Structures are given as structure tokens and as C-alpha cells.
Image (cartoon, rainbow, N blue to C red):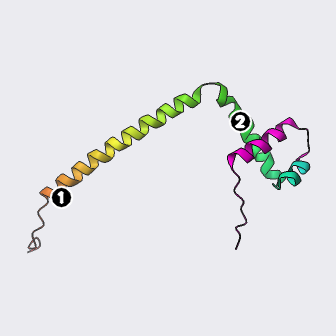
Amino acid sequence: MKSLRSKYPPSCKAKVALEAVKEEKTSAELSSQYQVHPGQIRNWKGTLKKGAVDLFNGNRKKAEDNKEELIQELYRQIGQLKAELGWVKKNLDLSPNVCG
């Protein structure tokens, strides 16, 4: 059974959104040409307009650096927690007569 939702690759979304921004064709024409609902085209167009500013202000590089720092910090925390868990398991007394 085919899923009702279609997944479009980012390149397709960008192409359709760029054509929508150009406004050389109507939304209905683009919809029939690319087999995409007009509301979806409107959403992609809005996303393009909002995201276009970030392409030119340099925030993308900063965000990538922050992401890398976050990943390193999370790996450090995982290592620390593994070490602590190992210590607790080693020092935990699991004798069978704990209750009595």
C-alpha cells in the first residue's frame, strides 16, 4: 500500500521554491508541473524566504561550530557516566543475604 505522504528531496524543494519566488508561473501551474500541492509550494516558498538571510550573514558557520562543541561535550559526559557506572558496579555488594 502506497503512503499518502510524498517525500521530496531537498533539491526538488529548492527548485520549486525558487520558481515560486520568481513568480513567472502561477501556483496552479507549478502545482500541475511538479505534481505538488499548491499549499506545499507556498510553504517551501516561505521557508526559502526565511532561510535565505542566514545564507549571507555567517551564522551557519557559527552554528556548525556550536554543534561540534556540543557533540564533543556529550561524548565527554557519556565517557564520564560509563566510568561512574563501572565504579558503582564494581563496588556494589550483591550478596544474597541482603534482606536478612
Range shown magenta: 1-27
Marks 1,2: beta carbons within 8 A = no
Quarter where residue 24 is shown? top right
Q: Position of residue 21 (x, y in %)?
A: 83, 37
In magenta stretch: residue 87: no
**Count of marks, rendered view:** 2
Q: Amino acid at mark 2?
A: Lys
The crowd level at tag 2 (other Cα within 10 Å; few <14, some 14-19, many 20+) is few
Does 38 sit above or below residue 4?
A: above
Residue at 43% over, 38% down: 70
Disc marking residue 24: none
Residue at 69% over, 50% down: 9
In what element is the residue under mark 2?
helix
Q: Which residue is mark 2?
A: 50
Does 91 sit above or below residue 51?
A: below
In what element is the residue under mark 1?
helix
Q: Which residue is mark 1?
A: 89
Q: Viewer-proximal residue, 62 or 7?
A: 7
Q: Position of residue 79 (x, y in %)?
A: 29, 46
Residue at 86% over, 35% down: 22
In primary-sequence order, the first of circles 1 and 2 is 2
Q: Position of residue 3 (x, y in %)?
A: 70, 67
